[in-house]
Amino acid sequence: MIELKNIEKYYSSKGIKHYVLRHVTTTIKQGEFVSIMGPSGSGKSTLLNILGMLEEPTYGTFEFLGEDVTSLNERKRIELYRNHIGFVFQAYHLIDEMTVYENIEAPLLYKKVGSSERASRIANLLDKFNIVAKKDLFPNQLSGGQQQLVGIARALATQPSIILADEPTGNLQSAQAEEIMQLFQKLNKEEGITIIQVTHSEKNATYGNRILNIQDGVIKEDSPTQAPQMGGVV
Amino acid sequence: MFKLNLKIAWRNLWKNKGYTFINILGLSIGMASCILIFIFIRYQMSFDEGFKNENRIYRVVSSWAYNDGNQFFSQGVPLPLTPAMRNDFSPYIEKISAIENSVGLIKINNVAGKEQLKAIENVFYVEPDFFEIFNYNWLSGNYASLKNPNSVVLSKEMAEKFFGNWKNALGKNINYEGNLNYTVTGIIDDVAENNSVPLKIMLSYKSFKDRNLEKWGSVGSNSESYFKLKPNVNIETLNGPLKSFLKKYYTEKAPGKEGHIFQPLSDIHYNDKFGNFSGRIMPIKQLYGLGVIGFFLIITASINFINLATAQAISRSKEVGVRKVMGSQRSQLVTQFLTETLTIVLISVLIGSVLTEIALPGMQSLFDAKISFSIFQHPIILVFMLLLVVFVSLLAGFYPAIVMSGFNPALAIKNKISANTGGLGLRKILVVVQFTITVTLIIGTLVILQQMKYIREQPLGFNPTAIAMVDLLNDSLKTQRFATFKTQLKQVPGIKEVSFCRTAPSSQNNNGSTFSYNGGKDADFQVNTKNADEDYLKTFDLKLVAGRNLVKSDTTNEYMVNETLLKKLNIRNPNEAIGKMISMGDMKAPIVGVIQDFKNKSLHETIDPILIGSLKPRYFYAAIKLNSKQITGTMKVVEEIWQNTFPESVYNQSFLDDQINAYYQGEKIMGTLFKVFAGVIIFISFIGLFGLISFVATQRTKEVAIRKVLGASTIELVKMLNGSFLVMVFIANLVAWPLAYLFVSKWLNGFAYRIEISIWPFALAMLISMAITLITVSIRSYKAAVANTIDALKYE
Ligand SMILES: Nc1ncnc2c1ncn2[C@@H]1O[C@H](COP(=O)(O)OP(=O)(O)OP(=O)(O)O)[C@@H](O)[C@H]1O
Ligand SMILES: [Mg+2]
């Protein structure tokens, strides 16, 4: 579903190009659970942002669902956000002024989903993530882990085919992190959602089925995770 | 500590350059407007001030109450009133003096007896007692000389005009109106412009001759009377004696019941019921109106300040928290924030002063007055500016300071102060208040302009274009030359018609008389009598509805009347009036024609009942209808003929169009003021709005970014950011409508001919305000919506 060919990204300052990504070429298929790893500053977030069309590569081609999206017009991009891509952020990025319920509802409103359909989807998600009791609370009344659950619920609301997550557990304690990772794994296994996450944690990476290791903007290693990790986790 | 505060204030202002700029821009324009309004009001309030015992000085004015409920007023008094009051009111009055205004030809001869200077001037006949009432600054001579006839006192300006140097003027002679020489016996310093009696040339009252000197039944606005009360006498105690005074002297039966009012000197400049010799009147209500507008301006600018300051408060919450933890007291924080406000206000008042200086010439020409912005001459202006600074600093600075200093340090440090702190609700209310003011002013301006246009386009019932009114001289010697003069004028190619008349159809010079119709008893209203020759109808394009024009005559043999007169007499059919007799005193003549109604005064007033008859000695003007393509050339020829006809006098002309336009000078000024101040308020409100939306957009950058990745389109984001602003402005419109309605209907009531209030100015004001709001906020929110969002999400 994703084809990257020779992606390059640099920032130039004072005429000198600082490369963040170089010759990144890879394919990610439907249903994969990919973890991007690498040292700080190696370009992981940049790569994920390019995948999420939040940034444009300076060179190379990027195909999403067979379509060249290297430089996409705004309408098309919004279209993809509404129907195919869900984001999960390290800092959750919930809207402070809206309740849990309203946060999850927001993308559905933009997608113009009918109200009864909306209500049932949100009810489903609240139920699935065990946050029904919290639906009328505001983000600052929740713990970090709970906020991230809401963030994921929101990402899932539009039933995207892919979730992009930049260090989704970076701000969480390990117990909460584990819960999130299990959730990702379940979504990937049971609902076939493609997941691409950036993570620093080896352990988190084991929940996925493929690891892209980036160093200095170059993919150093592209390997499947050690099976079988499913064990008794779920 | 203060120095440190100032330094921090300066840094903070610099850091938030954009908001600081908006604040200073709004405040300085607002303050400049306020200062302009203040110096104008100060100038107006300075009229007739500075005389010794000024609160004991009064003017006697006249009133008539008619049976039909109408009341008329005059600034003048019957000529015998002054001597009678001097006698009858002596227990209460220290001094009383008559003063008579007149216009005439002044001639100055040089030593050799040759004519050296000839000019038409405004003169006053005054009694010496006038100078016991008003203490002027005497440069030389004294007023005792005015006891004798043929003395004249000059102002310095006139003395210099006539004799070069005022020091040479004493003892010299001037000739007034050909027949009398006056000797200069005194010089006074120039009377300032802000005086209701613009004394320049003062002749002995003893030299004033008038056939009405003994008549109680005749009042002209040229004859005023002033008195000074004895110390410790209450003006109320004069009411009793006044009653018996009226009974004693007004013995003849007249349709209007005579009365007199003692008008305090301090009221003369503001009371538009009566005129005064300077012709300058400023109704106190208009001054209040201006004051209110000034107040609104400063409120609007202060609201900008409050809104931007409280909006910024959140971004400064951390600073507050840290300072509190370091041990700062709340009062110290308040002082610090107020110092910032004070800095801005001081910068604004300086810029505002510069703007005032720039706008001053425009203001002076608008009001035709020498309004001064000299704080040395008038230290009160400086006091006002200081008060303004203090007022604005407190009004604008206090609330934000309280909000900011009140942050809970723990929350503040954790940056947990939410966006709603600092009174989001209050901010909304203030924006609504601000726009209520703005929209009210827009509606007011639209209605005023609409009414002015309506007045301009009102059919007058006659045609005033291209008509020159040339002064005639009408003593018995000169009226003999009228016929030749008219014949000569009619031969000039650029002249279409000529009519000799007392006044134009529309004039501020009106003459009311008692009359009876068809042998009945005196009508219970007065008729406005105009005198004119047989060419009057043609010249002014007046229409007859019945009967015929006057036949050429030098005396009153027949009358034409207007429709209003018949209406007032309850005559339906104009033909019925033809042939009926009109008696006025010992004159009696039949009605031969009925003229279609024409507007004979400003449109503030309704049409008078009018009577027109020929009477040669009452022709004060030659009305000359010109070919509008060659006015200037023709008028030169007219002047030449005039000079040849009346070589002993000075030519004077004016155009009827200009005279009629002058009726609406006040409204024109009002319209200009409203346009300017509405513009200023709109500007201030909208830069404030721009500041607020900028703030909101910045504050919501992250939210915009999140929504974008959730699939929001640019339009949806712009709508989201704009929404509350449009709602606020909409609510402001709803609040403004009834307020504006009250205001404009009150204003329109002052016109006899007025537009009906329609929905349009209101709808248009809403459209304008909503459209400008939409544009203002959209510019900024569009920028926010298309900005590269990723930076807002990337790093935390
Ligand atoms: N706008 C920018 N201008 C200049 N350099 C940038 C910009 N954005 C990112 N970089 C640089 O690009 C490099 C890669 O950044 P990126 O955020 O992708 O790293 P990362 O692998 O996600 O690191 P971390 O693990 O710390 O999140 C860094 O060296 C960063 O300094
Ligand atoms: Mg990163």
Image (cartoon, helix red, strand yellow):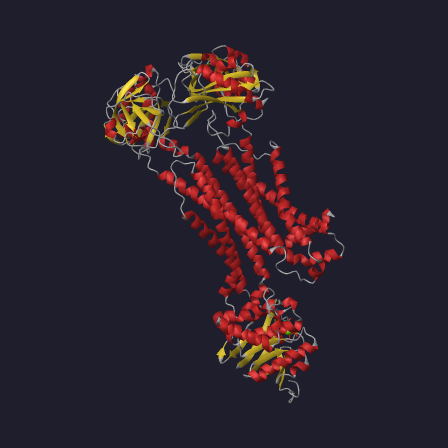
Residue B70 visible in the shown view: yes
Q: Nearer the viewer, residue B285 or B300?
A: B285
Q: Nearer the viewer, residue B274 or A67?
A: B274
Outermost residue to the top: B148
Give the quadrant of residue B49: top right
Relative to residue A23, is residue B261 drawn left or right? left
Outermost residue to the bottom: A228
Give the quadrant of residue B65: top left
Q: Which residue shows up at 49% across the image and 43% down it?
A: B676
Quadrant of the picture in which ligand 2 is shown: bottom right
Q: Nearer the viewer, residue B108 or A120?
A: A120
Outermost residue to the right: B327
In the picture shown, does residue A31 fall above or below B786? Answer: below
Residue A214 visible in the shown view: no
In the picture shown, does residue B496 fall above or below B406? Answer: above
- Residue B494 in picture, x, y percent from top left: 28, 30
Q: Which residue shows up at 41% across the image and 28% down it?
A: B70
Relative to residue B178, is residue B318 drawn left or right? right
- Residue B729 in picture, x, y percent from top left: 50, 53
Q: How many marks?
A: 0
Quadrant in which the C terminus of chain B is drawn:
bottom right
- Residue B158 in picture, x, y percent from top left: 49, 21
- Residue B743 in picture, x, y percent from top left: 47, 42
Q: Which residue shows up at 50% across the image and 15% down it?
A: B85
